[in-house]
Amino acid sequence: MVRDSDLTRRSVLRNSFRSHLEELDLLDRIFETRPNSISPRNKKTTWETENNVKIIFEGSHQANNITKEVLKNGEEVITITAASVNIK
């Protein structure tokens, strides 16, 4: 749940989060899943690179013509195929 490159800070945040969940009586609770309770059309997915580049899309990446390839060196190439691009 906590993503931080500083190990000390990550540990403090993780412990704080666990403590908060415990106070709410949510720690170690198991919630029943309901498949398809959120339609893929309404679900936004965010991919973020180590360079803080965000790609946000609704539905599956395949339906949005987004592909991700893992190179031999472990790096990933993300390709978006589109008829046009609007820069905002």
Image (tube, helix red, strand yellow):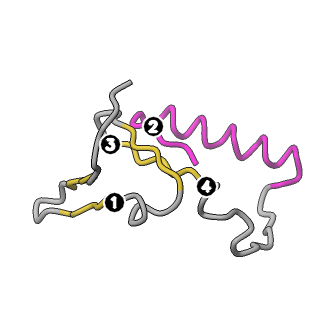
User: Is residue 70 rendered to the left or right of residue 62?
Assistant: left
Q: 32 or 16: which is nearer to us? A: 32
How far, Cα to Cα, is label 2 from label 1?
Answer: 31 Å
Q: CA distance from mark 2 to mark 3?
A: 14 Å
Please report whichever mark, 2 or 3, sits nearer to the chain's N-terminal start: 2
Residue 3 in magenta? Answer: yes
Q: Tag 3: Cα neighbours inside 10 Å, few (<14), some, or many (≥20)?
A: few
Q: Which of the marked residues, 3 or 1, is nearer the chain's N terminus?
A: 3
Q: Which residue is mark 2?
A: 4
Q: In which quadrant of the rendered image does the C terminus lie?
A: top left
Disc nearer the start of the sequence (1/4): 4
Q: Is residue 44 depicted above or below 59 in this figure?
A: above
Mark sitting on residue 49: 3
Label 4: few (<14), some (14–19) or many (≥20) C-alpha neighbours in 10 Å: few
Q: Which residue is mark 1?
A: 65
Q: Nearer the viewer, mark 2 or mark 3?
A: 3
